[in-house]
Amino acid sequence: GNPLKRAAGKVADALQGDGAGPPEGIPGRPAPEPPSVAEPTGPREPLPPKPDQSGPATVSPTGQATGADRARTAQAGGRLTTAQGTRLYDTDHSLKAGPRGPVLLQDHHLREKIMHFDHERIPERVVHARGAAAHGVFRGYGTAASVTRAAFLAKDVETPVFVRFSTVLGSRGSADTVRDTRGFATKFYTSEGVFDLVGNNIPVFFIQDAIKFPDVIHAGKPHPDREIPQAQSAHDTFWDFVTLHTEATHHTLWNMSDRGIPRSYRMMEGFGVHTFRLVDADGSTTLAKFHWKPKLGVHSLVWEEAQLASGVDPDFHRRDLADAIEAGAYPQWELGIQTFPDTPEQTFEGIDLLDPTNLVPEELAPVQPVGLLTLNRNPSNYFAETEQVAFHVGHLVPGIDITDDPLLAGRLFSYLDTQITRLGGPNFPQLPINRPHAPVNDMLRDGMHQTAVHRGVAPYRPNSLDGGCPFTAGADAGAYVETPVRVPEATKVRAAPESFDDHFGQPRRFWLSMSPVEREHIIGAYTFELGKCYEQAVKERALQVLANIDPELCRGVAEGLGLPAPEPTVPLADVAPSPALSQVGRTWPVDGRVVGIVTGADGDLDGVRAVRETVLDAGMVPLVVAPTGGVLGSGEDALTVQRTYATARSVEFDAVLLAGAPAAGGDAHGARDAKGTPAAVPGTVTDPRVVLLLSEAYRHGKAIGAWAGGETALRAAGVPADAPGVVLSDNATAALRQVIDLVSAHRVWERFGTAG
Ligand code: HDD
C-alpha cells in the first residue's frame, strides 16, 4: 500500500481524542484493588536501549572500553527497585507506626524517592529553553567533495543526527507559536567526531559582535521587575534596544515578517548564519554559508492563528513534529551551501561575509545541495535527550573551519561554558545523547559526574609509563588541523570595521522582496508590537528606523500607531529585490497537511468516508469533526470521530470541508428541500462553535470546501460562497480535489485584501 496513506492514517488514529474509552483509575471511579505483594501480571521487561544510547563507551589509553554503559543498565529487570537495586513491595505508602500513626524517619525508600524528586530539575537554557527534537539520518550527496574533505558530506555516507528546534526568548513551558526566532541545531555524529551546526531559521543575527549578546537577550527577556511578558518581543525593553542599536534592524524585520511565526518546524528553513571556511583534501579553502531547505517549503501561520494556538494548543509545533514522525511522514531538508572565493577581503559582491547581519542573495550565489536530512525517530525520553543535548559551534570536523566573524568568536566560548551550569560539570560529553559515535580517547579526567572508568596512570603527554599512548594523528590520519590563515598585522582595538556600518540596505532588500500580502503582515506585526509599548520615545525611534528602510512600511505602521511618519535620515539604499526571500507564489507538496471534515450527526457519511480516503491517498491527514465523540454510523462502515465541536479549533486545520446532508433515495446530489435548495444538516448550521471554526478558517486564508448543502453553514458563518478559495460542489471528492490544489499554495492569499 501507499506508505504515506498508512502514515496519514496512523496520524489520524493517533490524533483520535474523543472516542477513546476512559483510562484506568480516573477520579470518580472505584480505585483499583490494593496490590498484593505479588504483581497480578508478570512484570514487563524494560525497553531495549536505543542504538545511539549505547554508543561507544569511552576507551582507555590502552584501547579497552572503560566504564559500564549506564544507559544499558538504567532499567534492567522487570521489578521495581530502589536506586541500589533492592526490590520493593510497596511504593504508595510511607512506613508508619500504624495506619493512622506518624511516618517513621527510618523509611529509606520514602527518603530516597523524595530526595531524588527534589532534584529532578536542572537550569533551563539561558536562551532557546523551549524546544523539541528528533533523531534522524543525514546522507551526503558527494557534491561538496570539491570544496571540503568532511567525510560526512561524501557521496552516500550516512550519518546519524539529532536535531533540536527551539524558540529563543520563552521559558521551557512557554507556548510554541509566539513571534520569535527559531533555533535549528543539528548534531552530526560523524565518523570523524561530532559536528554541530547550531543555526536559526533566520539567516542574519541581531548583533555583529558576541559581546553584545547579553544586551540583546536582557532586552528581549521579560522585564526584571515583574518578569513579564513571557516569550514576547512586544514590550518596551526589546524595542528600546533594537531601535537604539540599529544593526538589529535586519533580524528584527525578519522577526516581524511571517518567518517569526512558522506553521511547523517541518516547514522552516535553517541557516548556519556565519560564513564558515571549508577546506578540501589539498588544503584549498572556500568560504561558505550553510542552508537547510525544507522539502515541504517554507510556510507560516498568520498572526491571529499563532495567538489562538498559544492558548488552544501551546505545544502546537512540538506535537506536529512528533505526530508526523510517529506516523512515518518523515520531515526532510536538503543541506545546501553558498560558496564564495576565500579572498583576503572576505567579501562577495560588496557584501562583507564577516558581518552576520548580512545575507547573500541566492540569486547572486545559488544554494548548492550537498546532502539530505531525514528525521525519522522521536526521542524516547525528553529529559535525557532533548533537554540534555549540548550543542557547540566549536564542535567541528576536518574540512570545516571558522572565520573571523566576531559573533562566532564569542559563541565558541559560550556554548561550552553554559553547559557547566546547565549540566552540572564538565563531563556532559559523556551523556548518551552527546556521546560521539567516533571512538573517544581523550586525556580529560575526573570532575563532577564522571562516569568513565579510565585506565592507565599517565593522562599526560609526553609519557613513557602508558607506552606513550594515546598517540596524535596528522591531517592524513584524520586529525583536525586549523587552516593556516594569515592574520594581517594590526593594532589591538575595540572597534568594528566601517563595512559593518550599513544597517538599512539589507533590510530594504528584504522589504522590497516581499509580496504585497507579506508586506501587509509585516506592517501588522510592527503595529502590534509597538502598540504594546508604553514609551512614546521608543515608538517614535522605531518609526525612524522604519523610515530608513522604506517610506511605505513606515507610513503603514505610523498610521496604525496614530503617529506622524518621519522622513528618512539616510538615503534609501539602491538594492535589487531577492525573489527567493518571499514565501508566496509557489506550490509545494501537501504531505501531512491536516484537513478537518466537519459533519453533523446526520451528515452525508458516505461522502465523509470517500473524502477521508481521498485525503489519505494524498498523504494528508483527515480529522473527522462531529457534534460529539464516539463513532458515526455503524458496522463496518462506522467512522471514528477525531474531534468534537468542543475540541476542534480552526488552527489545527490547513483546510476545512463541510459535509452536506446524505443523499436521499439514490440522489447523488444530496437531499433537497421543497424549493430544491440543498438541505442543511441540522446542528452544524447553527452551532456557534462551527460558525466560529468556519469564520476563523476563512479569515486565516484557508481553503474551505462544502458539498451537498454544507454551504448553508458557510452562510451562517458569513463566508461568501463566491469568495476566493471557497469550493462548492455537489460531489464530495470533487470538492476535496480543488481544496487540495489550494492547500499546495499554503493559503488562499487573495483573502488578505492585498493580492498575493
Ligand atoms: Fe546561541 C543556544 C543559535 C548566537 C550563546 N543558540 C543556542 C541554540 C541555538 C542557537 C539554535 C539552542 C541549541 C539547543 O537546541 O540546545 N545562537 C544561535 C545562532 C546565533 C547565536 C544561530 C547567531 C548566529 N548564541 C549566540 C551568541 C551567544 C550565544 C552570540 C553568546 C555569546 N546560545 C548561546 C548559549 C546557548 C545558546 C548561551 C544557550 C543554551 C546552550 O547554548 O546550550 O551558549
Image (cartoon, rainbow, N blue to C red):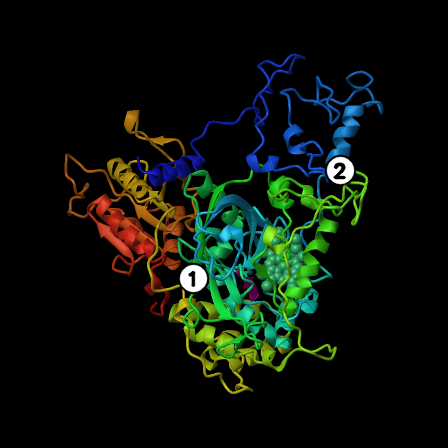
Q: Regarding ligand 1, which quadrant of the image does it lie in?
A: bottom right
Residue to which mark 2 is pinned: 454
Q: What element carries label 2?
A: loop
Depicted 35 relative to depicted 629: above or below: above
**Residue sitting at 49 percent across and 53 percent down?**
153
Q: What stretch is highlighted in magenta?
A: 273-280
User: Is 278 within the magenta?
Assistant: yes
Label located before the other in sequence (2 or 1)? 1
Q: In the rendering, at what x and y percent does residue 47 appear? A: 57, 27
Picture quadrant where residue 92 is located: top right
Q: Residues within 10 Å of mark 1 (few under 14, many from 20)?
A: some
The residue located at (35%, 44%) in the rendering is: 620
**Badge 2: how crowded within 10 Å, few (<14), some, or many (20+)?**
many
The kind of residue on which mark 1 rests is Gln
Q: How far apart are marks 2 and 1 (CA)?
A: 44 Å
In this rendering, the label closer to the viewer, 2 or 1? 2
- Most foreground residue, 324 or 35: 324
User: Can residue 550 be seen at all in this image of the molecule?
Assistant: yes
Mark 2 belongs to which amino acid?
His
**Residue that carries the numbered disc 1 in the rendered image:** 368
